[in-house]
Image (tube, rainbow, N blue to C red):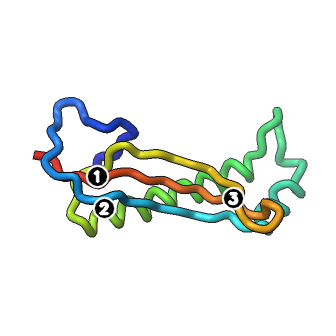
Amino acid sequence: MLKTTTPTVQGREIDTYLDIVVGEAILGANIFKDIFGAVRDIVGGRSGSYEKEMGKAREIAFEEMENKAIRLGADGIVGIDLDYEVVGAQGGMMMVSVSGTAVKFK
């Protein structure tokens, strides 16, 4: 499935705008404690464990959004927006959210 952050796709004409599709994934507080507790993993100001977990959450959110678009019969998703939010009591969780418009191309 074609996915893009742009509202159009060069060389492709959108036939039908189907619906807004969203995918979300939340990292719990335990992940943050484990990651921040593993100071030995931090090299050059970056945490490999943290980046790995954020990458997994992003993949889950994209997969969820794409599955919703497939169920609508979409050929692609345009105008994708990716957001990271701190949620929960005292910011104990991180949410990755992706959204876009499911479309059919001509």
The quarter of the displayed image where residue 65 is located: bottom left
Q: Is residue 41 placed above or below 72 in the rendered structure?
A: above
Secondary structure at numbered mark 3: strand
Give me the disc on residue 1: 1
Q: Which residue is mark 3?
A: 94
**Label 2 vs 1, first from the N-terminus:** 1
Amino acid type, residue under disc 3 in the picture: Met
For the point 15% across and 47% down, which residue is it?
Answer: 105
Compared across the picture, whether 42 is left or right of 74 comes to right
Labels 2 and 1 touching (C-beta < 8 A): yes
Mark 3 surroundings: few (<14), some (14-19) or many (≥20) residues within 10 A: many
Secondary structure at numbered mark 2: helix
Percent position of residue 98, x then y: 48, 53
Amino acid type, residue under disc 1 in the picture: Met
Residue at the farthest left position: 106
Q: Which residue is mark 2?
A: 69
